[in-house]
Image (cartoon, helix red, strand yellow):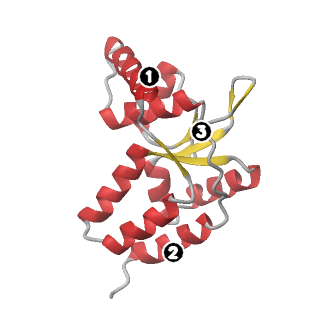
Amino acid sequence: MIASPWTSSLQRLLECGTRISRHRSTGPRFDGEAVGITFDTNFIIDLLRSDRLAVAKAKEIETRGDTRFLTAPVLYEITAGLLFARSRSEAAAFRAFASRLTVLPFDESSSVKAAEIRAELMRLGRSKGHLDTMIAGIVIQGGHTLVTRDRDLMEISQAVGLTVEGY
């Protein structure tokens, strides 16, 4: 098997993932403040590419000891991309990494929150993609902070109160 650029990056991600606890919280809150960090798709991809800003943010998050999460739509986006690239082994490696995190589902409460977000954005004339509003709904419903530098999610944060940490 020929190693791709993803292989060594995924190995680094898996090694990092072994240090991540399997804490299965669904989003504890302290005085209404978010206490969980949720990784967006672009943050994971930037980590895989060894982007220096993403790596620095990951180290900061690890130092703070924040509980880390993925959303089901992020799991979907990354897995679909790897499978499209015909990288079943890399998709499996990513799933192994993801298994070390709590994957937040798109359930009834987050789907209602996502619908509220989408409706508000449409009223404001700032409609965004369905996956972004789904991710925002899950993160807001869980009381988490989203780590991203996605422009659409940054705009959503300004419109509806999604808590975002850039890098």
In the foreground, 90 or 96: 96
Compared with 41, 18 (above or below) is below
Instruction: Answer few, some or many: residues within 10 Å of disc 3's Cα (few below 14, many 20 plus, some between 14 and 19).
Output: some
Q: What's the amino acid at mark 1? A: Lys
Foreground label between 3 and 1: 3
What is the number of the mark on residue 26? 3
Taking the image as shown, residue 21 lies to the left or right of residue 81, namely right
> Percent x, y for residue 110?
45, 28
Disc on the earlier residue, 3 or 1: 3
Mark 2 touching mark 3, by CB under 8 A? no
Q: CA distance from mark 2 to mark 1?
A: 35 Å
Residue at x-position 44% and y-position 70%: 93
Q: What's the amino acid at mark 3? A: Thr
Instruction: Answer few, some or many: residues within 10 Å of disc 1's Cα (few below 14, many 20 plus, some between 14 and 19).
Output: many
Identify the secondary structure beneath mark 3.
Answer: loop
Identify the secondary structure beneath mark 1.
Answer: helix
Q: What's the amino acid at mark 2? A: Gln
Disc on the earlier residue, 2 or 1: 2
List the residue tagged with mark 1.
113
What is the number of the mark on residue 11? 2
**Residue 30 is drawn in which quadrant?**
top right
Residue at x-position 30% and y-position 59%: 81
**Residue 7 is drawn in which quadrant?**
bottom left
> Percent x, y for residue 155?
44, 28
In the foreground, 60 or 86: 86
Foreground label between 2 and 3: 3
Foreground label between 2 and 1: 1
Q: Residue extending furthest bottom?
A: 1
Taking the image as shown, residue 99 lies to the left or right of residue 20, namely left
> Percent x, y for residue 137?
45, 29
